[in-house]
Amino acid sequence: MSRLGNILLWNLMAAVILLGQARPNMKFNSQSSSGLHSDCVGNLMRLSLDKALAVGNELEVEAINDTQHIVLTPNLAAQCGYSMESDLWGNTRIYSSLLGCYVDNKDDQTFNVALRLRMYSPSLSDVVTHDVTQTCSYTRWASREILCDRNYMEVSHHITTPDAEVKGQAQAVKESDHIPDASGAAHGIWKLTFYTPEPVAMVLKEAEQAGYGAMVTSTRLVMRSPYNTAETYSENVGGVSMEVFRVSAYYKAPHGLSVVNLAAACPTGGVLFDNNVISWHVPRRVTPLVDGSFEILEMHMGINGKRLDRSQMAARGYTLSTTDFHIVIEIPVGSPDGHYKSHAPDYQYHITYLVEPMLEILWRTTDTQDDTRYKVLFPITTPLMLQPPHIQENTVAESRVFSVLLGPFLHDVVLRNITFFNQVFTVEESNARGFIVKEHHYSNGTKSISVLVPFDADIVLRNNPEPLVTSYFLSLIFGFIILPEESPFAHLVELEASLQDVELPTITGTCDQNHFHISVKYGSQGNDFKAMVGHQQLTPGMDDYNVQENGTHFSLVLPYTAKDTAFELMTSDSVRARVDFSLLHTTNDWVLADLFLACNFPLTTTACYPNGTMTAMAVKVDSVTNILPSQLTLKDQSCKPAFSDDRFAYFSFSGASCGTTRTFFDHYMLYENEIASPYNKGASLTSPVDPRYRQTISCYYVVNETQTVGFLSKPRLYEPTAEIGSGQLMVQMRLAQDSSYEFFYQAEDYPVVKYLRQPLYFEVELVESTDPNLELILESCWATLDDDRLSLPSWDIIVDGCGNPDDSYMTSFHPVVSDARVLVPSHIKRFSMNMFTFTKDEEVLKDEIYVHCDAVICDMHSQADGSCRGQCVQPTHQMNYRQEMKGVKRVQRGTNSTNQRQISFGPIVLTSNF
């Protein structure tokens, strides 16, 4: 409902009002009346009982009449002018008519009401009592007063009796009668005649046995009837159903027997609901009570028995108006004077709204000039209103956590379990599995349920619609119950998120003199791919490729002459070979990664021998794909290859054959021939753009030349040394995203947000140096509240090269091994700690920290003492760590020596939002 946010609800168990049950012997404790409030509201006394007193207890109410205590059963309460109501959270109100049976009445002007409340513990072994007394003064009696309460109708009429005989006495109510401990008098009620509308006569005792109450006070005759008795009847008045009772009371007056005609009519309907507004209609002319013309003198609206003035009504949005036929009270649904209640018909979440308005009218009849005060307390409950919970999805895909908020709900709704697909977990089990389930309470008395589920949980379904994208899907069914009746209902929530989070595999490759070396690093989906060498899929049976696999990588080695390689270019002493290697998606054939690796391999294609023999190797290259090596020839086409296959052709011939030419120069001779594809006249090329294959073969021979080479060796007096210089060695500290130390937070990621006790992975590195003789040592590290490394308070993380022994979560060092990024492991130190924050008197001082370190750069071959002994390596006699309290400032940090570096990092922010 739109106005649900305007009310306050209490999530407490209801108090049970017990009326007249027998009790075993119990311990009696008398306590103060804190939590009780009594006041006078016109012709009623009202007692409010705070939920804190009644919650979890059973309540019993007794009326106090002098020294006697009378338990108010439901029948007796209606007969004697008492009403009680308690909501499901234990908030209780008790009303007593000032003309009630057990009220100490002083001349119909001063009224003393006394009640005893007994609260029994759930085990019934303990009882706490509260005695309540309230004195009310009420002198504005009308000639006739009619009171309509939730369980009875009361009418009183002014009469005249001698003060000496009836002053302050209740007539015809004596100890022998059905009503306990009520006093009588000589002038009392003799007979009652009820009109149904047929007359039914009863003496007083018979009427009391039938549940009616009748009495005479100093100035009034009082008659009281429960609803729905044999002598009451329903009547439609102006379209409003009303319960009516009419009676003639015969009583003894000083001058003899007198009769008073009494009538009461109380509405039981007349409520309309429209656009979140409750409209309560009461007939303007209550025909069972008014015969002729009349004038309305006063008209008041109230809540819970107490009048409201115009400003109070306006502040709450209440209206009191009249039409030709009705008096109308309008109350917005959700006003603060009422409360909501949850329901689950057909396993769907509904709510109702409950409020108790009061209408008080004073009218005067034209002919008799008699006044009638008409007062109605009328509890109203709205029809069931469907309240489907709102789903607020707060998932941020980059956080890799599903986040959903479901609500609002009233506090009588309890989450019992959650079904994740086909697995059902309680709230406790869900939290134990890392699915964070929390309640969020709001100032208007409602609450919502939030759930956080990581993407990598086993209950999350996933698929890949694109190579780099993963779609995550989560289905939840929330199982609720409504207290105290434990009515169940459920609500389905389906969440989906897509994230470009696929880490593709990577391929690297190198070459040696004869082989291609290819290495594949798996991505986030492991080895879920097809490896292709050229156009052929790599299979386990390809032993020639020397495939190796270790769970995170696989590698292969293939000769450059393998059938799956290609030749791009050939020179006289080398060949340029290429391998095309790719990784394809197993089902969609997406290209996940590829590598086109080309290298020059030594290959002697032409050899010239002193005896004049020449050999040549022809290679089929990619640029000429249509040739067959076996069909290649020399200039003399009769000179064919001595050996050939589908990729190579080998020729051997003398300088005086196969069309070889000879050219003389000043000091050498040049022999040349040519390997080419045969060309026949009239034959066309395979393609107009296909080139003919042509490879020139050349051999140089020197003509009559002699060379002399001189060599002189002279010993050195000393070995050459490098001149000593100076330079800066840089140290940096970074925060890794996880323990793999592969990915680090960048500048745009700061401040980095972490949860309490979440691990922080630091890496400190000596950069811009490749000297393997240097080692980086972390001498000390500590945390502060801001970026000032000397600020207080502070807390040690590393002390004298080792983790702080006073820290309950010890700092851990992680080994560093050489890999593609780490060339010199001694230049890097890695450690981890748990996220924390500084507190004082259990209050968080600040939700962020900065980390500072002093690092020392050492010569690994020196015998230096102190920090250069190694990370966390200390002599036995130096193992006494400094004991420093949080907030105690150190005198000095580090030595400020030339081989020491100071680094700081932050901020890292603590968060508690899930």
Image: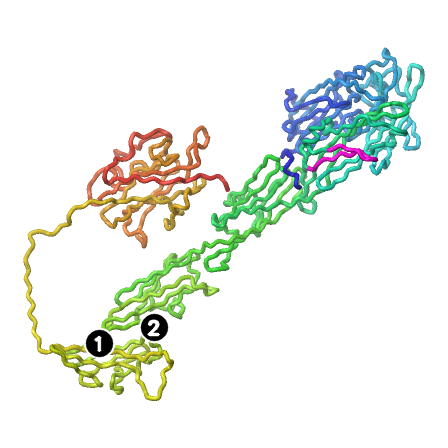
Relative image position of residue 677 (x, y in whole percent) = 30, 82
Relative image position of residue 273 (x, y in whole percent) = 74, 40
Residue 214 visible somewhere in the drawing? no
Badge 1 marks a residue whose secondary structure is: strand
How many residues crowd mark 2 within 10 Å: few (<14), some (14–19), many (20+)? few
User: Is residue 470 left or right of 625 when viewed as pictured?
Assistant: right
- Numbered mark located on residue 384 in the image: none
Which residue occupies the foreground of this view, 275 or 194? 275
* Kind of residue sitting beneath label 1: Thr
* Kind of residue sitting beneath label 2: Lys
Residue at the extreme top: 164
Relative image position of residue 650 (x, y in whole percent) = 26, 79
According to the picture, the residue beneath numbered tag 2 turns out to be 563
Q: Distance between the residues labelled 1 and 2?
A: 23 Å
Badge 2 marks a residue whose secondary structure is: loop
User: Is residue 694 left or right of 195 when viewed as pictured?
Assistant: left
According to the picture, the residue beneath numbered tag 1 turns out to be 606
Which residue occupies the foreground of this view, 703 or 25? 703
Q: Earlier in the sequence, mark 1 or mark 2?
A: 2
Q: Main secondary structure of the magenta part?
A: strand
Please give the range of residues in magenta: 319-333
Callout 1 touching callout 2 (CB < 8 Å): no
Residue at the extreme bottom: 682
Q: Is residue 704 above or below residue 119?
A: below
User: Is residue 412 left or right of 757 when viewed as pictured?
Assistant: right
Which residue occupies the foreground of this view, 400 or 725? 725
Residue 580 visible somewhere in the drawing? yes
How many residues crowd mark 1 within 10 Å: few (<14), some (14–19), many (20+)? many
Tell me which corner region of the image, top left, top right, bottom left or bottom right, holds residue 885. Answer: top left
Relative image position of residue 293 (x, y in whole percent) = 88, 29
